[in-house]
C-alpha cells in the first residue's frame, strides 16, 4: 500500500527515488518502441509501394491482352447517324445513304368499339367517353346547371329553354348539333362542368356547331362487364396471347389494369386506347416490318376490343430501314440500328435518325403511265430516281435503271428516260403491268453520312504512357525510400527502406524487364526503345524521347507493337504482369515481408507489456519495503516519546 506522502516519518523522499528507479528499469521498453516505430514506418512505406505496384500490374494486364489492340474508335460525319464498333471491326470509311427509317407495326382495332351514349340514362351512366362532371355550363351566354343524375335529353332541353329564341339541338350518330340564328358561343371562364367537352364540341364561329367525334366510348376505369363495349358486356375473366405471351385477367381487373399488364409483359407491344377514333391499338416496341400475333385463349378481350382480324381489326405494317453502304444495296434493316445481319460488316452497329428519298408505290395506271405513291413522294420534276423492290417491279421498268420523274401531284408522277423529257412531260416510259409486293422509288438525295472506323491508337498510346509512368513512379518511390541524407551537423539519416533487400530486388527486376529485348521476337520492334522510349543510364526513369516513332508504330506497325507486349511469357505485358502477380499474391514475398513486420510489431507490443509488468512488480515491492520502514520508524519514534515522557521528567 502506497503512502500519500513519502518520508513523513523518516524524512526521506523515497517515492521519487522509486519512480526514478522504475524509469531507469524501463529503458529497454524505450529501445523496443523505437524499433517498433521503425517497423511501422517500413510497413507503411511497403503499403504505399504495394499500391503503386498494383497500378503497374493493372496497366500490364491491359497491355498483355491481345484484344486490346483490336479496339476501335468510330466517328460519323453527321449527328443523325451514330455508330459503334466492336474490337476487330475492319478499319475503313463506310458511306451510308439512308432513304427510309424503320417504323413499328400496329394492330389497329376497329373503330366505334365503345357503345353510343344513351340519351335517356343518367349522365353518370350514359356511356360518355369523357365522364361528365356536375356543375355549370354556359351556352349563348346562358348558364345552365348540369346534374349527372339527369339524362342527356333532359340536360339538352334545359339548355334550349335557357337560351330560348331560335336556338335548337339535335342528336344523331352519337353526336350533338347546336344551331341558332347567330354564331354559337360555347362556355365561360366560370364554368365548372366539363359537359361541353364530353359532347366533343368546339366553337367554330358559325351558327351550327357539332360534336367533332362520337360522344360514346370506353370507360377504362370499369371492368370488362361494365366498360361499355359496343358488342356487349365482355367476359369477366379470361386470358389471351399477344406474340405468344399469355396475359390473364380476373373479374377485379379494369380495362386500364389489362392494358397495363400488356404493356408490362414480354409481348413487346404498347397497348393504348384512341379516344378520338374510339379504338384500341397495339404497337410493336421494335421497329420494322414485323407482325403481331393475337389469340383469345379464354374469355373475349381481343374480340370485344375489336383487335382481332375476325372483328375487323387490321395490321398496319411497319417499315424497314432502307439504305445503301458504300454504294452496295439497297439493303433493308428490321429496325433503325443497322447490324451485320443486314450490312454484312462484322462488329459495326449504326443507328439512323433521319432519312429521305424513298416513295412506296401504291398503284400503277398502265393506261396513263402514272405511278401513285402511298404518301407524298416529295419529288420535283426532273429528279432522278431508281426503282427498288423485294417483290416484283411493274412491267416495263427495271432495277438499276435511272428514270426521271414528271410530277403530276404530290402522290403521283410519270417516268421518263431523260431529264428533258421529264421536264417537257413527253415520252413517258410505258408501264405495262402493276407491281407485286413492295416497290419503292429512291431519289438521289438520301440522308448521307460517312462512318470512319480505325484502331483506337489514342487509347493504346495513353495506356502505354500510363504503363511507363507507373514503372517510373515505383522506381522513384524506391529511390526516395532507400536514399540517405546528411544534415548540417554531418548526421546521416537512412531512408525508411534502406537496406531492405526486397526493395532492391523489385527495382532491379523492373529495370531489367523494361530495358531489355523481348525474347522470341525477330521483328525490329523488340524493346521499349524501339517505339521511342529510352533511359539515361544514370537513373531508373524511362522517358519518351521520340514521340514520332511511337506514333508511326501505332499507325503502321500495330501488329509488331501488339507482339512486343503480348508475346506469350516474354512479352512486356505478360512478363510484368506475371512477376507482379506473384509478388503481390497473398503468399508473395511482399505480403510475407509485411506480415513478418506486423508480427514483429505485435511481438514487441507483448514484450513491452511483459516488461512493464515486471517494472510495476519491482516498484510495488520497493514501495512495500519503504512503507514497512516508515512504519518501523514510526514505532521507534513512538517508543522514544514514551520513554522520554516517563523518564525525562526527573531531570
Image: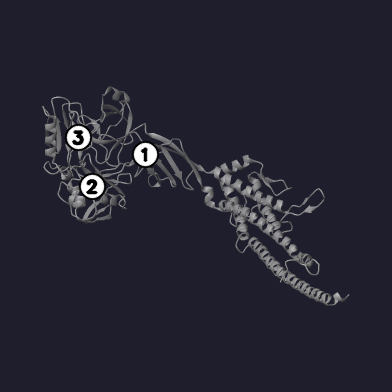
Indicate which disc, 3 or 1, sits on the residue closer to the N terminus.
3
Residue 502 pos. (x, y %): 69, 59
Marks 3 and 1: CB-CB under 8 Å?
no
- Whichever of callouts 2 and 3 sits on the residue coming sooner in the sequence is 3
- Residue closest to the eye, 291 or 404: 291
Residue 265, compared with residue 128, is above or below; it is below
**What percent of the width, then of the height, locates residue 25?**
77, 67
Write down the residue under mark 2.
220
Q: Residue under label 3, please give it.
A: 137
Judged left or right of residue 114, residue 43 is right
Q: How far apart are labels 3 and 1 at the CA level?
A: 56 Å
Q: Secondary structure under badge 1?
A: strand
- Describe the element under mark 2 as helix, strand or loop: loop
- Up the image or down, 616 lies above or below 418; here it is below
Going from N to C along the chain, the mark reached first, 2 or 1, is 2
Q: Which residue is mark 1?
A: 323
Decide which of 127, 287 is in the foreground and name it. Answer: 127
Q: Residue 453: where, in percent of width, then height?
A: 48, 41
Q: Residue at x 62, y 56 (%)?
A: 575
Mark 2 neighbour density, 10 Å: few (under 14) some (14–19) many (20 or more)? some
Amino acid at each position: 500500500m502506497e503512502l500519500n506522502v513519502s518520508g513523513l516519518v523518516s524524512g526521506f523522499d523515497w517515492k521519487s527515488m522509486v519512480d526514478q528507479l522504475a524509469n531507469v528499469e524501463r529503458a529497454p521498453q524505450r529501445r523496443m518502441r523505437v524499433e517498433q516505430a521503425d517497423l511501422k514506418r517500413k510497413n507503411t512505406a511497403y503499403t504505399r509501394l504495394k499500391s503503386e505496384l498494383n497500378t503497374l500490374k493493372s496497366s500490364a494486364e491491359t497491355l498483355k491482352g491481345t484484344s486490346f489492340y483490336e479496339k476501335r474508335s468510330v466517328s460519323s460525319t453527321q449527328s443523325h447517324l451514330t455508330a459503334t464498333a466492336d474490337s476487330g471491326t475492319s478499319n475503313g470509311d463506310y458511306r451510308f445513304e439512308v432513304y427510309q427509317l424503320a417504323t413499328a407495326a400496329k394492330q389497329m382495332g376497329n373503330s366505334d368499339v365503345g357503345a353510343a351514349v344513351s340519351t335517356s340514362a343518367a349522365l353518370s351512366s350514359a356511356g360518355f367517353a369523357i365522364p361528365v362532371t356536375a356543375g355549370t355550363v354556359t351556352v349563348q351566354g346562358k348558364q345552365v346547371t348540369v346534374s349527372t343524375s339527369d339524362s342527356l335529353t333532359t340536360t339538352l332541353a334545359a339548355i334550349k329553354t335557357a337560351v330560348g329564341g331560335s336556338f335548337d339541338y339535335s342528336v344523331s350518330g352519337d353526336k350533338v348539333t347546336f344551331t341558332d340564328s347567330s354564331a354559337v358561343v360555347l362556355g365561360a371562364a366560370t364554368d365548372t362542368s366539363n359537359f361541353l367537352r364530353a359532347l366533343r364540341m368546339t366553337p367554330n364561329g358559325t351558327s351550327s356547331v357539332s360534336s367533332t367525334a362520337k360522344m360514346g366510348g370506353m370507360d377504362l376505369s370499369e371492368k370488362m362487364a361494365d366498360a361499355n363495349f359496343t358488342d356487349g358486356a365482355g367476359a369477366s375473366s379470361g386470358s389471351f396471347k399477344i406474340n405468344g405471351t399469355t396475359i390473364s385477367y380476373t373479374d377485379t381487373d379494369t380495362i386500364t389494369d389489362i392494358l397495363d399488364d400488356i404493356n408490362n409483359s414480354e409481348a413487346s407491344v404498347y397497348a393504348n386506347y384512341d379516344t378520338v377514333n374510339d379504338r384500341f391499338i397495339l404497337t410493336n416496341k421494335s421497329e420494322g416490318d414485323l407482325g403481331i400475333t393475337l389469340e383469345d385463349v379464354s374469355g373475349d378481350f381481343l374480340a370485344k376490343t375489336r383487335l382481332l382480324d375476325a372483328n375487323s381489326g387490321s395490321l398496319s405494317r411497319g417499315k424497314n430501314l432502307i439504305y445503301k453502304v458504300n454504294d452496295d444495296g439497297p439493303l433493308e434493316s428490321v429496325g433503325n440500328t443497322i447490324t451485320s445481319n443486314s450490312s454484312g460488316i462484322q462488329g459495326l452497329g449504326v443507328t439512323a435518325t433521319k432519312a429521305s428519298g424513298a416513295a412506296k408505290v401504291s398503284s400503277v395506271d398502265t393506261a396513263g403511265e402514272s405511278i401513285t405513291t402511298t404518301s407524298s413522294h416529295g419529288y420535283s420534276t426532273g429528279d432522278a430516281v431508281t426503282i427498288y423492290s423485294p417483290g416484283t417491279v411493274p412491267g416495263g421498268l427495271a432495277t438499276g435503271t435511272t428514270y426521271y420523274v414528271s410530277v403530276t401531284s404530290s402522290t403521283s408522277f410519270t417516268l421518263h428516260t431523260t431529264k428533258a423529257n421529264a421536264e417537257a412531260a413527253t415520252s413517258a416510259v410505258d408501264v405495262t403491268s402493276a407491281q407485286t409486293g413492295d416497290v419503292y422509288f429512291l431519289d438521289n438525295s438520301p440522308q448521307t453520312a460517312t462512318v470512319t472506323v480505325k484502331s483506337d491508337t489514342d487509347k493504346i498510346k495513353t495506356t502505354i504512357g500510363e504503363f511507363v509512368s507507373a514503372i517510373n513512379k515505383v522506381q522513384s518511390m524506391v529511390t526516395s525510400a532507400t536514399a540517405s541524407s546528411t544534415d548540417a551537423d554531418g548526421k546521416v539519416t537512412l531512408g525508411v527502406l534502406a537496406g531492405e533487400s526486397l526493395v532492391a530486388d523489385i527495382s532491379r527486376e523492373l529495370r531489367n524487364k523494361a530495358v531489355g529485348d523481348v525474347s522470341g521476337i525477330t521483328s525490329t520492334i523488340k524493346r521499349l526503345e524501339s517505339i521511342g522510349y529510352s533511359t539515361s543510364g544514370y537513373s531508373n526513369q524511362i522517358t519518351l524521347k521520340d514521340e514520332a516513332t511511337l506514333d508511326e508504330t501505332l499507325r503502321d506497325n500495330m501488329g509488331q507493337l501488339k507482339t512486343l507486349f503480348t508475346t506469350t511469357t516474354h512479352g512486356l505485358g505478360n512478363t510484368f504482369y506475371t512477376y507482379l502477380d506473384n509478388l503481390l499474391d497473398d503468399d508473395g514475398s511482399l505480403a510475407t515481408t509485411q506480415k513478418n513486420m506486423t508480427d514483429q510489431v505485435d511481438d514487441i507490443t507483448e514484450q513491452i507489456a511483459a516488461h512493464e509488468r515486471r517494472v510495476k512488480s519491482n516498484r510495488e515491492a520497493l514501495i512495500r519495503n519503504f512503507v514497512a520502514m516508515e512504519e518501523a520508524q514510526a514505532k521507534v519514534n513512538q517508543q522514544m516519546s514514551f520513554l522520554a515522557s516517563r523518564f525525562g521528567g526527573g531531570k
